[in-house]
Amino acid sequence: MNISVVIPLLNEEESLQELYDWIASVMQSNQFLYEIIFIDDGSTDNSWKIITELARTHTSVKGIRFQKNYGKSQALDAGFNLAKGDVVITMDADLQDNPEEIPELYKLIITSDFDLISGWKKKRYDNVITKNIPSKLFNWAARKTSGLKLNDFNCGLKAYKNEVIKSIKVSGEMHRYIPVLAKNEGYEKIGEKVVKHQARKYGETKFGMDRFVNGFLDLITISFLSKFGKRPMHFFGLWGTLMFLFGFLSAFFIGAMKLYRVAYHIKTILITDNPWFFIALTAMILGTLLFLAGFLGEMIIKNNLNQKYYTIKESVNL
């Protein structure tokens, strides 16, 4: 199979038939062997009914329906687990991504040996205040933090080698940072292509301003995970050890000074009256807690490597 198209969606009943027809036309005109995987992320409209109808009449269509709305990251992860194509294309279901970009994205992966191509919506048809300006700030921060020189981290239209999407785990709201996750796994041939962006034709966006707040928080998370995600003891253990040693040495010094004053009959005060006693005690407690956090982090990582963060209610053509 040449291409798997993975499409997460939530309440997009108006656009699904048109989107399928558009993708199928592009695929057939280029003689691709393909599959289209729709992931219904807990829609409350007729989206799943339309997907099942498409799957009944077209064997290339596959579908998953989540038990409830888990989020775009979980939907993409489920689609990645199913995808069989040599190249995996992700796109949104709102008709703002142009399927006619697919042949060029496929060509870049196959002939130019890129691991991942990220779309760049250079000319956007979104609200300037609520989307364009916050998106520019978000992308600037992501570039500075990750070291990846991409102009548009949040573009839903991307292309991957199959081995890339099988090597990463997308959870939480990390779909914005899939290129960073891929880089962390050693896939550093990451390119970018300007893609056509269209105004939303049906319905309203499912994302509000809170996605940018969440995006920046996720950016901090992934920056930490990039360095210490697979070895939390290296961070928590180091700082815990340093704090414990600082507290222990401070307490040792306080105790030694107390013994010295007693031995030479010098007027002393109670150790608990010395503020350094509480500083030392607090440092030792915090150091112990940090060390335990690193230890527990290591155990959690080893026990949750294959954990899923979604429940599939039903599926078609799988």
Image (tube, helix red, strand yellow):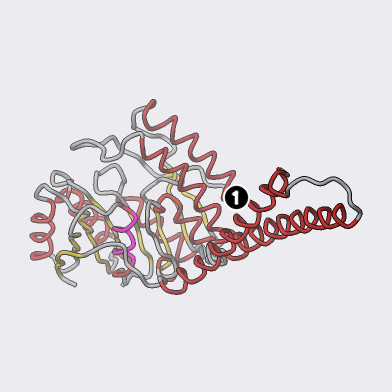
Q: Is residue 250 left or right of residue 15?
A: right
Residue 295 on the magenta segment: no
Q: Which one is nearer the viewer's eye here, 159 or 112?
A: 159
Query: In the image, which residues are magenta?
Result: 73-80
Amino acid type, residue under disc 1 in the picture: Gly
Q: Is residue 227 left or right of residue 313?
A: right
x, y percent for residue 21: 18, 53
Q: Which one is nearer the viewer's eye here, 226 or 21?
A: 226
Q: Is residue 201 left or right of residue 161?
A: left
Q: Which one is nearer the viewer's eye here, 10 or 24?
A: 10
Residue that numbered label 1 is attached to: 147
x, y percent for residue 149: 57, 47
Give the overall secondary structure of the magenta segment: helix
Find the residue positioned furthest to the front. 265
Q: Give the residue drawn at x 59%, y 63%.
A: 291
Find the residue positioned furthest to the right. 264
Q: Is residue 268 left or right of residue 32?
A: right
Find the residue positioned furthest to the top. 129
Q: Give the residue drawn at x 42%, y 38%.
A: 213
